[in-house]
Amino acid sequence: METDTITAISTPMGEGAIAIVRLSGPEAVSISASLFQGKNLNQVDSHTMHYGKIIDPETGEMAEEVMVSVMRAPKTFTREDIVEINCHGGLVSVNRVLEIVLASGARLAEPGEFTKRAFMNGRIDLSQAEAVMDLIRAKTDRAMNVALKQMDGRLSKLIQDLRQKLLETLAHVEVNIDYPEYDDVEEMSHEMMEEKTKEVHAEVTKLLETARQGKILREGLGTAIIGRPNVGKSSLMNALVHENKAIVTEIPGTTRDVIEEYVNVRGVPLRLVDTAGIRETEDIVERIGVERSRQVLKEADLILLVLNYGDELNEEDEKLFEAISDMNVIVIVNKMDLE
């Protein structure tokens, strides 16, 4: 276990009803008890909550009115003593409590350090630690459910089972080599060993094939909206997100930069990217936007190619078709109502 006590604000910054300052480490309870006016936190039962006040040691005055949760090791997330100070959610109040805790001997936690301690202390494995961040960043119910299953150890169990199969095969081979005189031990033939390793290989391959799907659920399907200037890319973006995120005018080249927004399509997050119209231009600012659009095009998982119904295909369209020839593309014909 770590020898120092860490602390951090565990709730998003901003105004709200409640904000939480969390401590974890061997002195979490004693530091909190030295600041808390109410019950003696050193003597309370584990996993209990207590009302009181945080007193500033320098002035002796009340800094905040709080509810304090005390959770003792090892039945905590980090397997260390944990204290959570629930205070009012204003920026000033929660930062004041944090400063007082830091001045009393705790150290400011590094990003992800509470989860790191849970991993280092054997509370969770590496795949479960990754799932914690996936759960926090989940943008759809489906992504959240996948993260929850991984946190529950489903991936870890699968990997352990595959490892166990390989160990059993290896042990069987070693027994045959070291003790050939044992008649009651089944001989591990080359065919049997090949069959067992192929089974494990197939499972690993199947697992790897799901990695891309997991990445999409975590980060979203990168979807680039591309086309010539003034074909309606920004209008499509606004329609999909149900919000006026992009400026729409009749002037070609209005969009000068990439605009991103997420939408939920049947549980799959789509990371929509509205791009500047791709064309040759002398305008320096628009040219930068076009270059960024080309970069987005290279990194996209899905392309929404927007075309004008009333326009003939020209050289710029041909270049776009060539650039996306080996990609997943949905062609959208726009402005049909204008004919």
Image: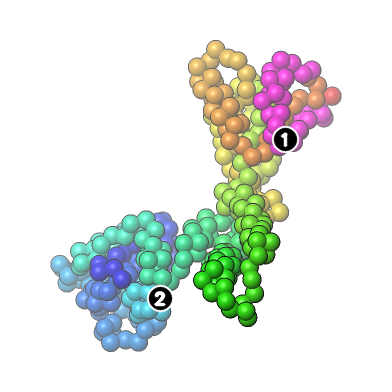
Q: Position of residue 275 (x, y in %)?
A: 60, 30
Q: Residue at x 76, y 25 (%)?
A: 308
Circle 1: element type: strand
Amino acid carrying label 2: it is Thr
Asked if residue 231 can be seen in this view, the reply is no
Which of marks 1 and 2 precedes in the sequence? 2
Q: Residue at x 41, y 79 (%)?
A: 75
Residue 306: in magenta span:
no
Circle 2: element type: loop
Q: Which residue is mark 2?
A: 76
Q: Quadrant of residue 51?
A: bottom left
Q: Which residues are magenta?
A: 312-338
Q: Residue at x 72, y 25 (%)?
A: 321
State the residue in front, 214 or 238. 214
Q: Position of residue 139 (x, y in %)?
A: 58, 54
Q: Which residue is mark 1?
A: 329
